[in-house]
Image (cartoon, helix red, strand yellow):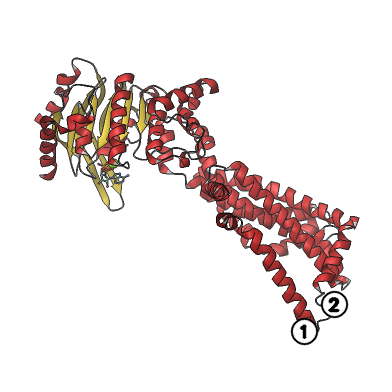
């Protein structure tokens, strides 16, 4: 294990205390086989995430953030290495561990709502697949609409909502089955700065009330610093851990911390690192 | 008001264009002195259609043609949607079935009709068969395309929820393919109708196709035109039925949402 990776895995002690490890990537590597030859997307990497921790993966475009997240979620099988989630080995041969997968909720870069389902039915879809009664799952969907702030739009088609509202619905869908882990891949990438700030504040609130563990991907530095307990900066081609930054501002944070010198210092430092890659 | 006119443009343009067509038609006959045997005057056609409407035979023949069309279309839906879904989902089914599906389309189907009549007699059966063979193809290819072009992001959602094959089919693939399937149905119903009529041309004593031939043999051009009007109206109604079905089945789709917005605006 390199010194940097060791730092990545022990650093959480600062913020997370002694809580147990929820997600563990052990020498995980991904090589894509394409017609033009192999693409080494992620080099052998160790990442540990503790329970209730908020970890942000930051890095330039194409450095393998999505690939790492997809390997955690089980949508992609690592070329080598092991993934453990909530105490379960994620892969048994070529099948994914059902219990581990059910602990994870994913919010993609696009909302990926089904256009033929109303908002409430989209949100309740995971519960339908879990065979919950209709009354129960619609009740849950309505609660979640309130939590993410789209009450009044339950019966609308996704196409009738704005991009920000659709992303809120996607978050509600991921939260519907109370997953212990939330994986988010640039969920607010397509939003304007104002809506993005607002969504960040709400995400922090949701994270605090639900008590889940979050891995959040972004390439916005201020967003990373605002949200994270720990920022893992990745370097490109093949993706590997470049540095780890602990962010210790007390919770709940508000947008005002962005003007604090300490905040700006972290942002500057990360920007320098990104530019020197 | 302007918006209303734009949203309902066809309601204004259609009568005007039809009227223009009728005037040209009438003028042509008067100017070039065309005989009634070749092309009757518009008014004669209207009169002839008016007489036909009162004729029980017309409705009996219409009933037969509609029956053959709908039954043929029904089988075409089963083969087209079922087959298309299977081919889209299971690789070896697609590879095995494709040559045969294509064969049914490249064979001159009108030549097949004589064969069907030989096998199945002069009743409705061969016409239904022709309607099915004509109509199933666009339904099948569209279903196949629809099932195969499911959004990858949507697939990720289902995979992340560890949905099974059947659940993925019913909650994702089928609804996602529905707009394409309905586009196939819109073509399919028209082809089923054509199939039934052409079948009636070539054999039997029933249906609007037979009626057309009957008038042709009697050199009754006005009567022929009357049947043509009936054929057009019935075809139009069949097509409208599918369009209404579209609004019912995919109210969420752009094609329907846009219409709704246009009407509201
Ligand atoms: N399915 C695939 N087949 C081949 N190469 C792939 C595949 N998916 C990703 N890659 C390659 O792997 C590398 C990492 O991709 P990845 O999507 O993880 O980047 P990213 O950090 O999420 O970028 P972005 O910030 O632009 O979303 C890229 O070079 C990409 O071209
Ligand atoms: Mg990405």
Mark 1 and mark 2 lie on one chain; the one further toward the N terminus is 1
Instruction: Classify the position of the C terminus of chain A by image quarter.
Output: top left
Q: Is residue B196 above or below residue A61?
A: below
Q: Is residue A266 left or right of residue B240?
A: left
Q: Which residue is mark 2?
A: B37
Which quarter of the figure has residue B219?
bottom right
Q: Quadrant of ligand 2?
A: top left
Indicate the position of residue A139 as horizontal and vertical percent values: 49, 21
Q: Residue furthest top?
A: A18
Does any atom of ligand 1 lie closer than 8 Å to the CB of label 2?
A: no
Q: Quadrant of residue A256?
A: top left
Which residue in the structure is indicated by mark 1?
B31
> Could you tell me which residue is drawn at 18 percent across and 16 percent down?
A17
Instruction: Say if A248 sits above or below B179 in the image.
Output: above
Q: Which percent across, then down, holds residue B174?
A: 54, 40
Q: What is the CA distance from the residue labelled 1 to the residue labelled 2?
A: 16 Å
Where does residue B263 sit, x and y in percent of width and height? 58, 49
Helix, strand or loop for disc 2? loop
Q: Residue at x 47, y 27 (%)?
A: A124
Quadrant where the N terminus of chain A lies? top left
Work out whether disc 1 and disc 2 sit on a shared chain.
yes
In-image side of A133 versus A52 (left or right): right
Residue A54 found in image quarter:
top left
* Callout 2: chain: B
- Disc 1 residue: CB within 8 Å of ligand 1: no
Return the mark for residue A42.
none
Of A60 and A158, nearer the camera is A158
Residue at image coords 83%, 66%: B46
* Callout 1: chain: B
């Amino acid at each position: 294990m390199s010194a940097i990776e060791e730092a990545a895995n022990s650093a959480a002690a600062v913020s997370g205390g002694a809580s147990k490890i929820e997600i563990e990537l052990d020498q995980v590597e991904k090589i894509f086989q394409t017609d033009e030859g192999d693409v080494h997307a992620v080099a052998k990497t160790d990442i540990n995430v503790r329970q209730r921790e908020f970890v942000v993966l930051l890095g330039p475009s194409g450095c393998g953030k999505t690939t790492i997240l997809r390997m955690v979620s089980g949508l992609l099988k690592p070329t080598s290495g092991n993934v453990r989630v909530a105490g379960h080995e994620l892969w048994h041969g070529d099948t994914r561990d059902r219990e581990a997968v059910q602990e994870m909720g994913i919010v993609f870069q696009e909302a990926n709502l089904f256009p033929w389902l109303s908002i409430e039915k989209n949100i309740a879809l995971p519960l339908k697949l879990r065979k919950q009664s209709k009354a129960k799952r619609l009740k849950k969907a309505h609660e979640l609409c309130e939590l993410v702030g789209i009450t009044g739009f339950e019966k609308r088609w996704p196409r009738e909502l704005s991009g920000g509202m659709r992303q809120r619905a996607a978050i509600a869908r991921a939260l519907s089955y109370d997953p212990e882990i939330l994986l988010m891949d640039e969920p607010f990438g397509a939003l304007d700065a104002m809506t993005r700030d607002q969504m960040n504040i709400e995400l922090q609130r949701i994270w605090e009330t639900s008590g889940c563990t979050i891995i959040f991907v972004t390439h916005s530095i201020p967003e990373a610093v605002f949200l994270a307990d720990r920022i893992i900066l990745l370097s490109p081609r093949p993706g590997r851990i470049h540095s780890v930054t602990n962010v210790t501002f007390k919770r709940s944070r508000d947008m005002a911390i962005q003007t604090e010198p300490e905040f700006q210092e972290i942002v500057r430092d990360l920007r320098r690192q990104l530019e020197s890659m | 008001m302007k918006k209303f006119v734009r949203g309902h443009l066809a309601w204004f343009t259609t009568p005007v264009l039809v009227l223009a067509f009728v005037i040209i038609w009438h003028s042509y006959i008067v100017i070039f002195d065309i005989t009634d045997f070749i092309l009757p005057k518009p008014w004669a056609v209207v009169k002839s259609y008016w007489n036909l409407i009162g004729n029980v035979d017309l409705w009996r023949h219409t009933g037969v043609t509609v029956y053959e069309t709908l039954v043929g279309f029904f089988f075409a839906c089963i083969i087209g949607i079922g087959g298309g879904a299977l081919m889209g989902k299971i690789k070896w089914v697609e590879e095995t079935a494709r040559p045969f599906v294509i064969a049914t389309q490249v064979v001159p189907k009108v030549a097949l009709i004589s064969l069907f009549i030989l096998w199945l007699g002069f009743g409705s059966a061969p016409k239904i068969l022709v309607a099915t063979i004509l109509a199933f193809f666009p339904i099948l290819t569209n279903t196949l395309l629809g099932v195969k072009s499911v959004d990858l992001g949507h697939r990720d959602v289902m995979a992340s929820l560890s949905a099974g094959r059947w659940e993925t089919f019913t909650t994702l693939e089928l609804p996602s393919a529905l707009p394409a399937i309905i586009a196939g149905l819109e073509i399919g119903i028209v082809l089923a109708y054509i199939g039934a009529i052409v079948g009636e041309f070539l054999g039997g004593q029933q249906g609007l196709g037979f009626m057309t031939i009957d008038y042709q043999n009697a050199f009754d051009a006005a009567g022929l035109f009357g049947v043509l009007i009936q054929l057009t109206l019935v075809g139009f109604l069949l097509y409208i039925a599918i369009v209404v079905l579209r609004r019912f089945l995919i109210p969420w789709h752009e094609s329907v949402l846009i219409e709704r917005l246009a009407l509201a605006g």
